[in-house]
Amino acid sequence: MGQQTDTGRRAPLSRDRVLHAAVALADGIGIEALSMRKLAQELGVVPMALYKHVANKEQLLDGMVDVVVGGIDPPAPGADWKSAVRQRILSARRTLLGHPWAAQVIQSRTSPTPVVLAYMDSVIGMFRTGGFSVDLTHHVMHALGSRMLGFAQELFDDAPSPDPGVTAAAATEAARRYPYVTELAMAVAHDGESVVGRGCDDQFEFEFALDLLLDGFERLRRQGWTSGR
């Protein structure tokens, strides 16, 4: 029997294969560099073959979001609402940190994708079965915002780098005008890899804020809080 050709050995193209290849490619080259042509090259097909499985680039991005969010760990069985929500959100964070482009793409969607909706439904369900009213759950979801999916939208992406052209007099004047900003900025030796500011521990800051929110939600639940008060 003759040797099997590359075409014969190649797995048949499917939507699932296209989406997983796109996620892997974006992980490697970045979401900005991803294109249908590059994805087709990666899969060893002509670009038109992709359009049998995804209608356009936007549908491709929707599917990639669903692949990533679908990798979040399922809810822990038997856990109380706070532990279950915390575990689910921290799993979402670990998952999205493995795909640095994912948060940007999720924020760019005009409406939630099916898997994102299912994830949201699961988180909402944890609060509802944990004794939260519909009213309080509504406000809880607003308070969590993007943190529910494991990322925080910071006011500033980074602390500004010192400008070598700034004179000592100008720096002194800035410190006089903005004393508390200066005090806080000088309190930590910052590191450029952090989202919340150079030197801040992103994971610590994320969990710190998440735990504050969860503790606050529990206090309101116990009080029977409603937005009408």
Image (cartoon, grey):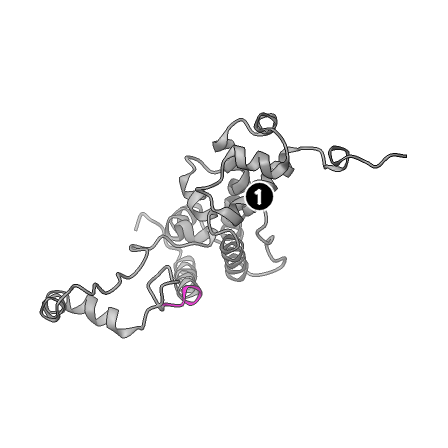
Location of residue 72 in the rendering, given as x and y in whole percent from the top left corner: 57, 52
Tell me if 66 is positioned left or right of 153 in this view.
right
Tell me if 15 is positioned left or right of 29 in this view.
right
Residue at horizontal 59%, vertical 36%? 41
Which residue is identified by label 1?
67
Closer to the camera in the image, 45 or 114 = 45
Q: How many numbered markers are drawn?
A: 1
SS state under label 1: helix
In magenta stretch: residue 205? no
Residue at horizontal 37%, vertical 54%? 225
Furthest-right residue in this view? 1
Residue at horizontal 50%, vertical 37%? 61
Kind of residue indicated by mark 1: Val
Residue at horizontal 36%, vertical 50%? 226
- Position of 116 relative to 212 (above/below): above
Question: Tag 1: Cα neighbours inside 10 Å, few (<14), some, or many (≥20)?
Answer: some
Location of residue 37 in the rendering, given as x and y in whole percent from the top left corner: 53, 33
Closer to the camera in the image, 175 or 168 = 168
In magenta stretch: residue 201? yes
Furthest-front residue in this view? 2
Over which residues does the magenta segment extend? 200-204
Closer to the camera in the image, 37 or 142 = 37
Location of residue 63 in the rendering, given as x and y in whole percent from the top left corner: 55, 37
Q: Quadrant of residue 184?
A: bottom left
How would you classify the magenta stretch by its main secondary structure? helix
